[in-house]
Image: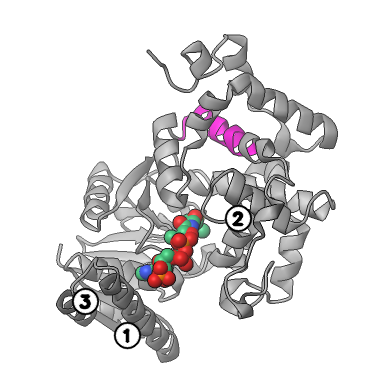
Amino acid sequence: MKKAAVIGAGMMGHGIAQLFAMAGLDVVLVDVNEEILDKALKEINWSLGKLVEKGKLTDENAKKTFLRVKATTNLEDACKDVDFVVEAVPENLELKKQVFSRLDKASPNHTILATNTSSLSITEIANATQRPEKVVGMHFFNPPVLMPLVEVVKGEKTSDETVETTINLAKRLGKTPALVKKDVRGFIVNRILVSMFTDACHAVRRGEATMEMVDATIKYKAGLPMGAFELADYLGLDIVYSVSKVMEEAYGERAKVCPLLEQLVKEGKFGQKSGKGFYDWTVGRPRIPFKLAGKYDVERVYAVSINEAAWMVYEDVADPQNIDTAVKLGTAWAQGPCELADNLGIDNVLAKLKELYNKYGEEVYKSCPLLEEYVGKGWLGKKTKRGFYTYE
Ligand code: CAA
């Protein structure tokens, strides 16, 4: 594999193109206008500069890497001689299908077409091409240059060879691949993040806590790198909204989109990139007061995340090990949700979910049957030497 194309030069696209170039591949970045491409090239240059500053890249290497990135508005021209394509255009199924139909016609027969979709169906996107066996999900995390995970998602017709090539490519880009066995909405990491964010957002909507209380608790008590609202703003509320909508369609009431998020998106407040979102980013990264840590119930953050992980095990989407690796590497949590459940005691997690469900009657708190089953069998986690994992 020598040459790749990345379609869409936004936050994800330009980061992915940079990764290809850093791994020694020539890469063409494609978008609809020169202005977006110029901005993307500037961002890549900035990021390479940061890596030099941190001693992760030599100055000479950074210069060579930058020269390997070309930019164009001509998709057909960009794809005529590439071995691999990653699409990273906005989360809109119709748009992605149109792009894939063009990629299929423009690319050589051997070329694998990957989508960086966060939530949409790989199978449906693949069906817009004549080569569904060569279409795969390759889901990077923001910022792609720093986050070590790539979810590799198999569509219904994706061949084993395509999956294997994509896994090897992810490794060549310096990433750890996590295989998602089923083409489910939200794959692994977004299912966990959306469940945590949805609970937090509804709590703020009900006036039970402020977003600063939630974020301070998540950051300083749970020890996650960013609060739920801070992370949503960082990722882009337009993106979080479209992912949440897809999840709502797939999982119903359990993933009910929070009206606060909907309102901000309607007002064009997309978070960091537009200056305003839940926080005001025009004055820099939000300062989340340490003194508010613990003013929200941290057990509840854990319980909803663990419940979603349990659903994934129950539905055979991924095993506990894969879920934990994906969450730790994709969002920099110190522990994955299954490990966390075993450490907290699955009986305690179930009790918290029941308490929340009794209080609010909302589906997000309805416990997964797997948790009931484990508790029924006495599999409570580390303390009984059996939970999501087995202990000696
Ligand atoms: N390239 C190079 N360097 C970068 C960079 C990039 N793209 N982005 C940030 N940096 C640098 C910063 O400039 C900073 O450098 P200085 O120390 O010189 O200032 C350094 O990295 C550390 O950054 P910060 O001090 O700003 O903040 P931090 O220590 O919190 O690290 C972070 C930033 C790595 C993003 C960390 O906060 C983190 O891991 N957050 C969680 C992110 C996450 O969960 N991502 C996944 C979300 S889900 C997703 O992406 C999927 C989806 O489909 C929506």
- Is the magenta region chiefly helix, strand or loop? helix
The amino acid type found where label 2 is placed reads Gly
Q: Are marks 2 and 1 in contact (CB under 8 Å)?
A: no
The image quadrant where one finds the C terminus is top left
Going from N to C along the chain, the mark reached first, 3 or 1, is 3
Q: State the count of labels.
A: 3
Q: Residue at x 16, y 74 (%)?
A: 61
Residue 193 seen in this snapshot: yes
Looking at the rendered structure, the secondary structure element under dot 2 is: loop
Looking at the rendered structure, the secondary structure element under dot 3 is: helix
Q: Position of residue 261 (x, y in %)?
A: 71, 62
- Residues shaded magenta: 304-317
Q: Position of residue 52 (x, y in %)?
A: 26, 73
313 lies left or right of 9: right
Asked if the magenta segment contains residue 283, the reply would be no
Give the numbered dot on residue 227: 2
Q: Are marks 2 and 3 in contact (CB under 8 Å)?
A: no
Mark 2 Cβ and ligand 1 under 8 Å apart: no
Place residue 37 in its image quadrant.
bottom left
Give the numbered dot on residue 72: 1
The image quadrant where one finds the N terminus is bottom left
